[in-house]
Image: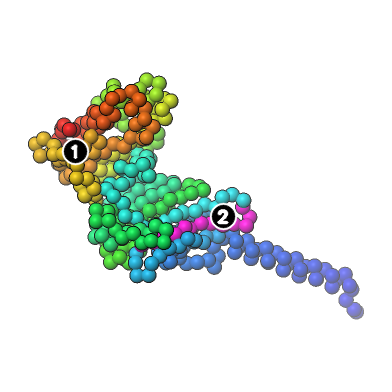
């Protein structure tokens, strides 16, 4: 018996539907997942799996603006997710090598809020937040790794600190995933530079910051007897407000103090026994003054104190808004800085069994 036309049409419709569905599935897999995607990014420096854990939203991973120089460890590159099915801004992470000056995570306004970071435990120096982070390369790398700016390779500074840095835009990421990506990328860079160490190959363990809380004006940052001097408190403009402390890492204690008032002011305090940061501070500054009794060296807002377990670097970083408010009320902002910093160092001395010192 001959086939009925209806049967032929049904079969053709079914086959056509299957082709369309298959095409849609293939398009979805290609545009919205990492199936059959690249195994590495940034000229082989970043593993695909590490990037996937950091940028885990829908879309397909790709890299762009990759800059490397044959035979050199320096690089810069952008990794992002793109999707045909989303109109949201594509999350992206910019990775690069850098040659920084001094204990940069605590003394520059580029790296804000040290009290909000999760710090690496163990031998590797590093810190991350949901929007960025850094890993300091081993000291043997400091004279070997610089950075790329535009089309130029900038060699390492004689007093520089080599690092691998990440900045996240158009979103936030899990600090643990970012820490792993940074550590493994740093290991790759160090291997290329011939200065690799075993510690970089270990999965990083993080010490997360505490939650924000209201500041006790007589126990600022949770330190006994730490109070802002009267000169540092500006009624209605800059008064104790909220604070956040990160103290889970053995070698780093940091606090961000957000001041209440119209100035929108803030100040961060840090104490670290990390040998890399202590050395970076000494290399960066020739203006340190000797402390009495040979206990170390200091400036109005930095000090390296010889403590029971080794040298400890103390510092305070005032926001530009705080500086401006203080300048409008006091003839000498430096003296306010010195008095505030002296109170901090005195109150934080017990963190590392440090002697009492007088800040010049």
Give the label on residue 58, or none.
2
Q: Name which residue lies at 28% across and 66% down.
A: 194
**Dominant SS in magenta:** strand
Please provide percent x and percent y for residue 134: 36, 51
**The magenta stretch spans which residues?**
74-86
Relative horizontal placement of residue 62, taking residue 342 as reference (left or right): right
Give the label on residue 298, or none.
1
Please provide percent x and percent y for residue 313: 22, 42
- In the rendered image, the quadrant that contains the C terminus is top left
User: Vertical placement of 186 versus 220: above or below?
Assistant: below
Q: Name which residue lies at 33% across and 23% down.
A: 329
Q: Nearer the viewer, mark 1 or mark 2?
A: 1
Please state which of residues 325 and 171 is positioned toward the viewer in this rendering: 325
Check residue 181 for magenta coloring. no
Q: Name which residue lies at 72% across and 68% down.
A: 19
Check residue 79 for magenta coloring. yes
Q: Is residue 196 visible?
A: no
Please state which of residues 213 and 281 is positioned toward the viewer in this rendering: 281
């Amino acid at each position: 018996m001959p086939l009925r036309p209806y049967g032929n049409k049904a079969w053709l419709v079914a086959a056509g539907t299957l082709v369309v569905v298959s095409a849609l599935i293939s398009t979805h897999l290609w545009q919205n997942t990492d199936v059959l995607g690249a195994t590495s990014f940034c000229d082989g420096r970043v593993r695909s799996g590490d990037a996937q854990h950091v940028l885990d939203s829908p879309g397909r991973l790709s890299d762009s603006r990759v800059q490397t120089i044959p035979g050199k460890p320096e690089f810069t590159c952008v990794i992002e997710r793109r999707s045909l099915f989303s109109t949201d801004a594509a999350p992206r992470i910019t990775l690069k090598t850098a040659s920084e000056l001094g204990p940069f995570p605590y003394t520059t306004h580029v790296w804000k809020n040290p009290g909000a970071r999760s710090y690496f435990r163990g031998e590797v120096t590093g810190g991350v937040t949901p929007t960025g982070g850094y890993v300091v390369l081993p000291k043997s790398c400091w004279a070997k790794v610089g950075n790329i700016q535009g089309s130029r390779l900038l060699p390492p500074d004689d007093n520089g600190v080599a690092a691998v840095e990440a900045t996240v835009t158009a979103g936030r990421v899990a600090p643990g995933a970012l820490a792993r990506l940074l550590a493994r990328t740093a290991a790759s860079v160090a291997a290329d530079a011939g200065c690799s160490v075993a510690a970089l190959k270990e999965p990083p363990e993080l010490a997360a910051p505490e939650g924000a809380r209201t500041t006790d004006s007589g126990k600022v940052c949770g330190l006994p007897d730490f109070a802002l001097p009267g000169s540092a408190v500006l009624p209605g403009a800059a008064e104790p407000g909220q604070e956040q402390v990160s103290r889970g890492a053995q070698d780093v204690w940091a606090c961000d103090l957000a001041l209440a008032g119209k100035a929108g002011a803030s100040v961060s305090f840090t104490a670290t026994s990390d040998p890399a940061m202590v050395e970076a501070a000494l290399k960066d500054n020739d203006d340190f003054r000797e402390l009495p009794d040979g206990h170390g060296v200091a400036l109005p807002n930095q000090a390296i104190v010889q403590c029971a377990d080794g040298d400890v670097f103390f510092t305070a970083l005032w926001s530009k808004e705080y500086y401006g408010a203080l300048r409008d009320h006091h003839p000498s902002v430096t003296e306010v800085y010195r008095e505030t910093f002296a109170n901090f160092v005195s109150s934080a001395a017990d963190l590392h069994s440090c002697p009492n010192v007088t800040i010049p």
